Image (cartoon, helix red, strand yellow):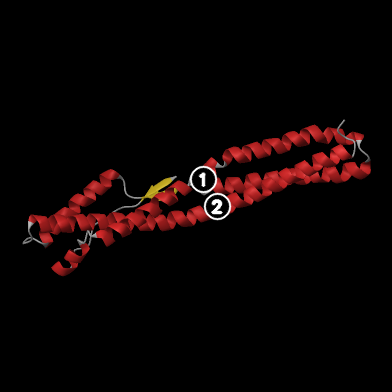
């Protein structure tokens, strides 16, 4: 689920000196804004990593259950001393797969990002900022007014990206934690499945 921020109204600056500082559009300001934008887009992209990993989990889960379905009936031909431990390993396989699915669902439940305000809201806010700035700096030249308005609108947008990036980073951290748990559980199940198949073959169950 996607949430959006609201740009709100910019607070009037107390004097021309402060407004001139905010109007800085030099290389340093551009670099910092680019960095914030890059981090914001990166966290948005990270939100999709859980979805991209679903084919792997689906394949691993299907392979585990298919192997158990093929090997388990063959255990009847093996001696009890072999069949019981192998059956226990397959039972643990099922438990690990269930744990993996549960962890993956926990990661999916935490999907969702915080985005900047919608375009219509940004345009409305920019118009309000322009009006407030013209009222505050009535004696400024058109170029000065445009520079201050641009700086305030850019500052508001960057502030939104900073807030959204922090929120999305924490959500992504939780998603990665649950996804990693799902991965460990599924890999453990696959290793046990391979071990169970080998043990069944050695025990003479697969002929």
- Estimate how packed mark 2 is, as few (under 14), some (14 to 19) or many (20 or more) residues with alpha carbons within 10 Å: some
Give left or right: position of 142 versus 183. Answer: left
Q: Label 2: which residue?
A: 176
Q: Secondary structure at mark 2?
A: helix
Q: Which mark is residue 49?
A: 1
Farthest left residue?
A: 139
Give left or right: position of 129 versus 162. Answer: left
Q: Secondary structure at mark 1?
A: helix
Give the number of marks.
2
- The image quarter in which residue 22 lies: bottom left
Q: Is residue 68 above or below residue 28?
A: above
**Which quadrant: the C terminus?**
top right
Task: Tell me the distance, in whole angstroms, between the alpha carbons under discs 1 and 2.
Answer: 8 Å
Percent across and percent down for residue 87 are 83, 42
Say whether residue 15 is visible: no
Percent across and percent down for residue 173 are 52, 55
Mark 1 near mark 2, Cβ–Cβ under 8 Å? yes
- The image quarter in which residue 193 lies: top right
Give left or right: position of 21 versus 175. Answer: left
Percent across and percent down for residue 182 are 63, 48
């Amino acid at each position: 689920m996607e949430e959006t921020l609201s740009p709100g109204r910019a607070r009037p600056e107390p004097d021309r000196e402060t407004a001139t500082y905010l109007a800085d559009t030099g290389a340093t300001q551009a670099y910092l804004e680019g960095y914030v934008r890059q981090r914001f887009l990166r966290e948005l992209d990270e939100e999709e990593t859980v979805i991209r990993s679903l084919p792997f989990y689906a394949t691993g889960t299907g392979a585990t259950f298919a192997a158990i379905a093929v090997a388990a009936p063959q255990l009847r031909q093996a001696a009890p001393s072999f069949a019981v431990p192998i059956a226990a390993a397959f039972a643990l396989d099922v438990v690990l797969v269930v744990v993996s699915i549960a962890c993956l669902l926990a990661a999916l439940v935490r999907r969702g990002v915080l985005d900047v305000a919608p375009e219509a809201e940004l345009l409305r806010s920019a118009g309000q900022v322009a009006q407030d700035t013209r009222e505050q700096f009535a004696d400024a030249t058109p170029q000065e007014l445009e520079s201050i308005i641009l700086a305030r609108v850019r500052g508001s947008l960057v502030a939104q990206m900073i807030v959204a990036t922090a929120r999305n980073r924490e959500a992504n951290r939780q998603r990665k934690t649950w996804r990693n748990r799902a991965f460990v559980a599924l890999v453990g199940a696959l290793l046990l499945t391979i071990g169970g198949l080998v043990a069944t073959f050695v025990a003479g169950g697969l002929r």
